[in-house]
Amino acid sequence: MHCAFDAYGTLFDVAAAARQAAAEPGNERLSESWRTVAANWRIKQLSYTWLRAVTGAHADFWQVTCDSLDWAMDAAGLAGDDVLRERLLDLYWQLSAFPEVHGMLSELKRAGHAVAILSNGTPEMLRAAVDAADLTELVGALLSVEEVGVFKPNHSVYKLATAHFRCTPAEILFVSSNGWDAAAAAGFGFRSIWVNRNDEPIERLPWKPHAVVCDLTGIPQFAGSQK
């Protein structure tokens, strides 16, 4: 089975940058609000990708990440703290992977499954994240929306995976922590799994993921059952 993974929030913990910065000396103001900053940073990051996609105003994911952090810092009363801003952005290039990621990808590799990342991130961002998390030998391809110039869930993004693997959508197991992404991917034709880490309600969309899990531990079993 071919396996394609979303990156941010699925393999990499998007809250890690704010959490780490908040624990560092001199960032006491962030320590009081880092959870809110991290949540708003992520919410704006996603909403800006959707707005840019539907209006045709594409900018790469790094620009979107910077813009959304600016909004989140402003909302928390931290606007103008350029040192903190630069630290948070620097940490975003080295987000930690979730604890089960390395073992899960290793199991997929041992079983002979081809693995790719299919992400809104730029190629440079994805390479940095994969290298920092020591996943370089476990991920076969980094597929970025920059190849098509529009963000998920546009179908041209999902087609990057079918083109890479040279297969039909039904031959790809797609895994995402974003409910809307897992749903849209199912609508495209992928075998889709939603990693619902926060026990959220299912999205009210025309399509549903084929399975819902709380973490990535069982992904190799899903991949094996699809052979």
Image (tube, helix red, strand yellow):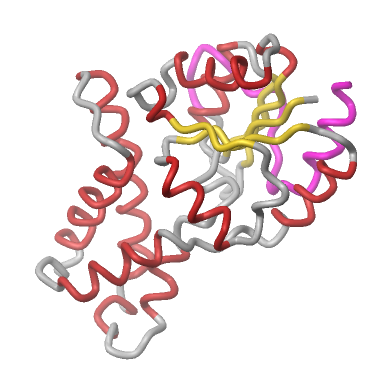
Say if 214 sits above or below 119 in the image. Answer: below
Q: Quadrant of residue 5?
A: top right
Q: Is residue 128 left or right of residue 198?
A: left
In the current view of this chain or complex, which residue is farthest to the left?
80
Q: Is residue 129 above or below residue 122?
A: below
Start and end of the magenta stretch?
Answer: 203-227
- The secondary structure that most of the magenta stretch takes on is loop
| Residue at (29% x, 23% y) in the render | 53
Residue 159 picture location, percent across and down: 53, 15
Question: In the figure, is residue 206 to the left or right of 89?
Answer: right
Q: In which quarter of the image is the C terminus?
A: top right
Quadrant containing the N terminus in the rendered view:
top right
Q: Residue at x 43, y 71 (%)?
A: 19
Residue under the point 29% across and 37% down: 60
Q: Which residue is drawn at 22% across and 19% down?
A: 56
Examine the image and state in which quarter residue 83 appears.
bottom left
Q: Of residues 109 and 46, which is closer to you in this image?
A: 109
Compared to residue 53, the image places residue 217 above or below, namely: below
The one of 203 and 47 positioned closer to us in this rendering: 47
| x then y, percent, for residue 115 | 70, 35
The image quarter in which residue 194 lies: top right
User: Residue 137: x and y, percent?
Assistant: 71, 51
- Picture coordinates of residue 62, whole percent (x, y): 31, 46
Magenta includes 214? yes
Residue 192 is covered by the magenta coloring: no
210 relative to 196 in the view: left or right:
right
Total of numbered circles in the picture?
Answer: 0
